[in-house]
Image: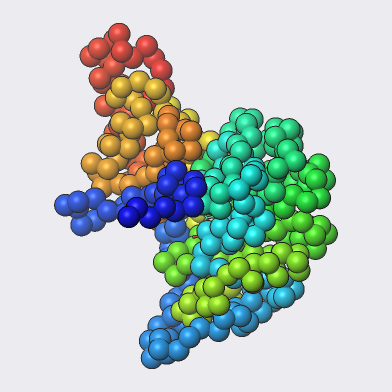
Amino acid sequence: MTLTPRPGILEVAPYVGGEAAIPGKNRVIRLASNENPLGPSPRAMAAYATLEKEIHRYPDGDARALREAIARSEELDPARIVCGAGSDELIALLVRGYAGPGDEVLHSEHGFLMYSIAARTAGAEPIAAPERDLTADVDGLLERVSDRTRLLFLANPNNPTGSYLAEAELRRLREGLPEEVVLVIDAAYAEYATQDDYCSAMDLVAEFDNLVVTRTFSKIHGLAALRLGWAYCPPAVADVLNRLRGPFNVSQAAQAAGIAAVKDRQHVERSRAHNARWLAWTLERLAALGFDPRPSAGNFLLVRFAEEPGRSAEAARAHLKKHGILVRAVGVYGLPDSLRITIGTESETRAVVQALEDFAARAAAGAAAEPAAGSGAQA
Ligand SMILES: Cc1ncc(COP(=O)(O)O)c(C=O)c1O
């Protein structure tokens, strides 16, 4: 007998996360998954540690204290908050709630990969709209809307490009969409964005009954291992997510650590300031070395490399790996000439820049030895 899954399931290419280990190397610098290099708040770690003797108990299925803590911290309505095992779970639940076979789920060309994966697992078709200068394009998105479109996902800031849309563009997008299309703004990196015209779109949720914002504890809060995310929703969408989610989808450890994390504003501030400083430093250093880093509103940089042997993104990735540094290849995002590099601690950041300086020098030396291959292109 051959078991047959639902049509389309076997066509889903599973998400592959950033590399986390190098065989034979004990000390690895992990800059492949946009984690907070400063780790979680000490208060979150302490809260997590207190749960050791309680792990035989089911968690609070409503995550009430956590939702209230988030609501207090962000000045929101706790009834509109739905928590999930990472924002990945909420993305998948939103798709399952609103799309199925025959429907379309829209996202931008280089948008976060989970949108197309979630669409396919629900039997819906993901549709990619072209971007402009590696930035989501409102007109391009609106042109791709059809009468089968059910959801539109926009990561803001976007992973892996680091680009974002300002509030006026978000409004133009919402106002240009049919009312029955759910607009999901995925603000996983919201806390890192320092740009004056950036907005996490929380206010828009109160204004429109078809706009959802998702957030995560995996990035600035440094709790990726615990799997914790949340969605801020119109009441009808919160109701749908609450019916779909598992009754105990968020562990008590995640809830306890999450409550402590949102209360520790100092840790968030420290992490934001660290990122702003070393993101700017890395951008400047890489540009000075002749690479092509893009401005970023997140905790990572997308860096483009020359498409030549010895200078390519793949050559750079292999060089970094040899030096014990893991960064993210982004070919699956349609960007085979680029790498995504997370901003690490000061020493990690200096190490990656040093290794790329060495890579550029070797490439230049190679080009000098073989003038035909070089022709003065960037490293
Ligand atoms: C844009 C974006 N959204 C969502 C996620 C998923 O985060 P979580 O760990 O909350 O599932 C990520 C993780 O990299 C991301 O980059």
* Residue at x 24%, y 50% (from the top left corner): 22
Q: Which of 127 and 285 is in front in this view?
A: 127
User: Quarter of the image containing the N terminus?
Assistant: bottom left
**Count of marks placed on residues:** 0
* Residue at x 44%, y 43% (from the top left corner): 11
Q: How is the image coloured?
A: rainbow
Question: Where's residue 99, x and y in %?
Answer: 64, 52
Question: Where's residue 108, x and y in %?
Answer: 61, 39
Left or right relative to 74: residue 360: left
Q: Nearer the viewer, residue 244 or 53?
A: 244
User: Does the rendering let one see residue 158?
Assistant: no
Q: Which of 204 and 280 is in front in this view?
A: 204
Q: Which of 354 and 152 is in front in this view?
A: 152
* Residue at x 53%, y 62% (from the top left corner): 89
Question: Where's residue 24, x and y in %?
Answer: 16, 52
* Residue at x 27%, y 14% (from the top left corner): 368
View extreme (bottom): residue: 53
Quadrant assignment, res 356: top left
View extreme (top): residue: 372
User: Does the rendering let one see residue 26?
Assistant: yes
View extreme (left): residue: 24
User: Quarter of the image containing the C terminus?
Assistant: top left
Question: Where's residue 142, x and y in %?
Answer: 74, 37
View extreme (front): residue: 1
Quadrant assignment, res 329: top left
Left or right relative to 3: residue 137: right
Instruction: In the rendered view, tell whether residue 238 sits above or below residue 192.
Output: below
